Image (spheres, grey):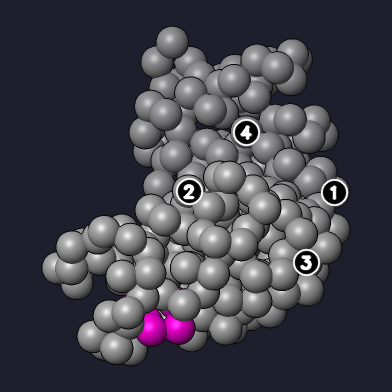
Amino acid sequence: MDGDQLIAVLTRHPDPRKRARAALELGELGYDEALEPLITMLKKDENHLVRRDCAEGLGLLGDKKAVDALIFSMINDEFHYTRNEAAEALGKLKDKKAIPYLIKFMQNDEWDFARASGALALADLNAKDSLPEILNCIENEENEFTRRDMLRAVHKFRDKSSLKLLFNLITNDESWEVRKKCAEILGWLATPKTLEILVSVLKGDNHMLVKQEAEKALKLIARDFRMKYTTAEALLARKNELVS
């Protein structure tokens, strides 16, 4: 079907599954005339799956004129998947206007997966000023998988202001997946203390995959500073050669 036919399906077909599919196809097609129909159906369609796919379609379409509608949907839609897709779409559209709304969404949405999507959208927007809020959310997040996914946002920033939290998590977090993600990030944040922590994790963590990630991070640091990696202890002995 061409764009006009898909719009007709989106706005008039009685089957919500077909309306939802049309919303995605319009976004994938990049059909500019679909902007207003997608916004309209995001606001008014009674089926939550259609609204969800309209939000995703708008993100794929890439028109910043959809930002206001997506912000409204992210904050107000009753269906958690729609709110989540709206947050992801805002990250794709890269309009700084969305930043304060994404911060509140990350802090307050009832669905843990959506909170992580808010953090990742802020990283996609390169909203560096939001990093303290992201770190605070991670510190207070009870769901281990949400902590892990929010750390993906921290990874994108690669900012040494996150080191204090990363050191604490990699040492104390109960989730091996969280600790593993911290090790991966630390490979990009070289300081003498980073080396100390990674060597300690390599020696003492109780999960093989965390240990492996810690050694990968040490090798990455050695490569970036043009040091030959032989053993973790030998690299640690040269820690003062790193620019902190």
Q: Alpha-carbon neighbours of circle 1 within 10 Å: few (<14), some, or many (≥20)?
A: few
Tell me residue 112's x, y (percent). Answer: 77, 54
Callout 4: helix, strand or loop? helix
Label 3 or label 1, whichever comes before in sequence order? 1
Tell me residue 128's x, y (percent). Answer: 45, 79
- Amino acid type of the residue tagged 4 in the rendering: Asp
x 56%, y 39%: residue: 56
The verdict on residue 13 being magenta is no
Judge left or right: residue 19 versus residue 30. right
Q: Quadrant of residue 11?
A: top right
Q: Alpha-carbon neighbours of circle 3 within 10 Å: few (<14), some, or many (≥20)?
A: some
State the predominant SS element of the stretch in magenta.
helix
Q: Alpha-carbon neighbours of circle 2 within 10 Å: few (<14), some, or many (≥20)?
A: some
The verdict on residue 192 being magenta is yes
x 38%, y 38%: residue: 32
Label 3 or label 4, whichever comes before in sequence order? 4
Callout 2: helix, strand or loop? helix
Q: Residue tagged by mark 1?
A: 78
Q: CA distance from mark 2 to mark 1?
A: 42 Å
Q: Residue tagged by mark 3?
A: 141
